[in-house]
Image: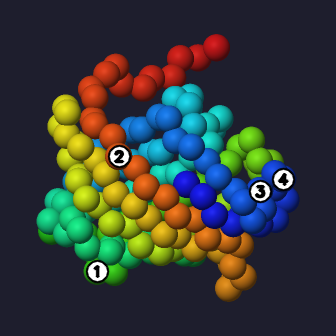
């Protein structure tokens, strides 16, 4: 993934931002949704830098492989009103207006915890999209990074991914 990033309160970004992914995850959730994580390292979300795509209707997106699918920026008001829970239901019960795709950027090594999480919008094209063992997941994206509370643009990111699903032990947290 490469591009330009200028996030308020963050350091070490700039016009030549680049990140290589070496950990990939496909995580289904109730209602036919799926989370795809592209990260540096396989640590937990709070410590790993990466990009996460939330697919709220996996079957619909799989049917639309090869299409430029819109990544809808998260609306803070909709998120606060519980959009993810309302939209992460079976398709026949999903309210009108639910997005198909959301994206989130996690940069804990560059940004302090109090930094504002950017809104990501743009397009994602899947060449392959599977969830079973040895299924391929591949695609490319073009994202605009912006202020979630306004119209200020903070950057652009482009990238691609290509990996095969391997089934391993589920991620589990243990108390210290």
Q: Quadrant of the C terminus?
A: top right
In the rendered structure, the answer to whether residue 77 lies left or right of residue 124 reads right
- Specify how the rendered protein is coloured: rainbow
- Where residue 159 appears, x then y in whole percent? 49, 58
Crowding at dot 2, Cα within 10 Å, few <14 / some 14-19 / many 20+, comes out as some
**CA distance for labels 2 and 1:** 32 Å
Query: Nearer the viewer's eye, disc 2 or disc 1?
Result: 2
Q: Is 13 situated above or below 172?
A: below
Residues at circles 1 and 3 in contact by the CB criterion of under 8 Å: no
Instruction: Quickly name the residue at label 4.
Output: 11
Nearest to the observer: residue 46 or residue 97: 46
**Disc 4 crowd, CA 10 A, few/some/many (<14, 14-19, 20+):** few
**Dots 4, 1 in contact, CB < 8 A:** no
Q: Which mark is residue 162?
A: 2
- Spatial separation of the CA atoms under disc 2 and disc 4: 29 Å
Mark-to-mark CA distance, 3 and 2: 25 Å
Name the residue carrying label 3.
13
Seen from the viewer's position, the closer of residues 144 and 9 is: 144
- Choose mark 2 or mark 4, whichever is in front: 2
Please give left or right for residue 73 compared with residue 125 in the image: right
């Amino acid at each position: 993934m490469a591009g330009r990033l200028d996030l308020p309160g963050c350091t070490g970004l700039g016009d030549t931002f680049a990140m290589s992914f070496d950990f990939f995850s496909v995580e289904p959730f109730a209602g036919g949704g799926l989370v795809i994580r592209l990260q540096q390292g396989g640590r937990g979300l709070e410590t790993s830098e990466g990009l996460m795509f939330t697919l709220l209707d996996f079957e619909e997106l799989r049917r639309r492989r090869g299409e430029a699918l819109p990544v809808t920026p998260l609306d803070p008001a909709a998120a606060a009103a519980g959009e993810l829970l309302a939209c992460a239901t079976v398709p026949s019960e999903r309210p009108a207006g639910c997005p198909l795709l959301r994206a989130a950027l996690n940069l804990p090594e560059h940004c302090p915890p109090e930094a504002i999480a950017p809104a990501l919008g743009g397009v994602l094209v899947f060449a392959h999209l599977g969830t079973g063992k040895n299924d391929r997941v591949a695609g490319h994206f073009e994202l605009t990074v912006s202020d979630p509370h306004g119209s200020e643009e903070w950057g652009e990111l482009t990238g691609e991914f290509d990996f095969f699903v391997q089934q391993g032990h589920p991620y589990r947290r243990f108390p210290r």
